Image (spheres, grey):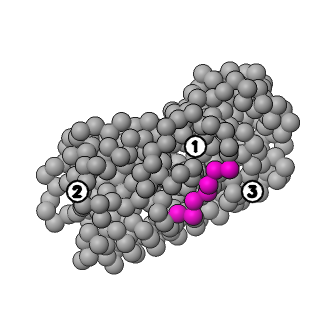
Amino acid sequence: MSKWLSIVLPILCLVTACQPNSGLDTPAELPRVVVTTPIIGSVVAEIGAEDIHLDVLMPPGSDPHDVIFRPADMALAARADVLIINGAGLEGNLDRLLSSVSHPDRIMALSDAMPLRESTCKEDHGHHHDHHHHHHGDADPHFWMDPHNVMIWADTIAEALSQARPDRSEAFVQRAADYQAALHELDEWITEQAAQIPSAQRVLVTDHKSMGYFAARYGFEQVGVIIPSFDTASQPAARGLAHLLDQIDAHQVPAIFVGESGNKTVAGQLARDAGVPLVVLPLESLTDSDGPAPDYLSYMRHNIGTMIQHLAAAN
């Protein structure tokens, strides 16, 4: 991991420091690539490296579900040679951003290449659904929680960058392959860590439905959520919280995991009522360069390692 961290940190420091109102003097020979989230930016930085100019619209620590794109963001998107979004409803107010792009063929939604998990939940989620074609209805947009999906990202991103700069296509493809090798190592590490926990104890309670891809890949069960939605902007229901307390007790759940941008007031009260610790993690975004998760690989190792540590302590 240290090799990848040493490569990506200098790039991310440059990228995330770049505010949406900067960088309009991009060198003519470098294609401008604009991405919505820091997680996407981390992967694009690995594959594009010095052969692109990268702008990340959301700062580290932001919640993509309720982001408000500013006029400066739309100005950057309008000038992009490639605009890469997560899609599947992750980014709030996405239509406003996409309306600034006069060439829709420059927009790449990573969700379009994903094997999306659809919601089987029938309750009213209580929040507005954006019906743009990149929303995919009630699909789970947190597909980066399975490294195998990020392997698909790598190929998709390399293809998009190659179209923007054909002369560096071979370099993009090679970097994507190298990054996929690192993702394979990450997948093996998570599998080894998960093996420490008996299958009956691989239970998760989180602030919203964000761990579905991870749970399906590594044999965990998301037995309950505070917000019965893929979106942190929704609100929990008192009746649902009472049922969740019963689930925590029935499954002997050892901890509740909540994102830094989640509702920690409700989650904290639930944890106190259940008599279990509340563990706050950067689930929706990366941290800045001084934090434990400044790039995707360290993000996964930090979050999953912390989760497994708490679950294994219950043995």
Mark 2–mark 1 distance (CA, rounded to whole Å):
30 Å
Residue 107 in magenta?
A: no
Instruction: Determine which of the numbered discs, if any, sits on residue 219 in the image.
Output: 3
**Residue that appears at 48% across and 48% down:** 89
Amino acid type of disc 1?
Answer: Phe
Q: Nearer the viewer, mark 3 or mark 1?
A: 1
Instruction: Determine which of the numbered discs, if any, sits on residue 82 in the image.
Output: none
Mark 3–mark 2 distance (CA, rounded to whole Å):
44 Å
* Dot 3 crowding, Cα within 10 Å, few <14, some 14–19, many 20+: some
Instruction: Determine which of the numbered discs, if any, sits on residue 230 in the image.
Output: 1
Q: Position of residue 55 (x, y in %)?
A: 29, 50
Q: Nearer the viewer, mark 3 or mark 2?
A: 2
Indicate which disc, 3 or 2, sits on the residue closer to the N terminus: 2
Indicate which disc, 2 or 1, sits on the residue closer to the N terminus: 2
* Dot 1 crowding, Cα within 10 Å, few <14, some 14–19, many 20+: many
Q: Position of residue 11 (x, y in %)?
A: 33, 53
Against 287, residue 172 (above or below) is below
Amino acid type of disc 3?
Answer: Gly
Instruction: Determine which of the numbered discs, if any, sits on residue 102 in the image.
Output: 2
**Residue that appears at 78% across and 40% down:** 313
* Dot 2 crowding, Cα within 10 Å, few <14, some 14–19, many 20+: few
Q: Position of residue 106 (x, y in %)?
A: 29, 62
Q: Position of residue 253 (x, y in %)?
A: 79, 37
In the image shown, does 290 or 128 lie closer to the viewer? 128
Amino acid type of disc 2?
Answer: Ser
**Residue that appears at 66% across and 33% down:** 226
Which residues are the magenta region?
A: 114-120
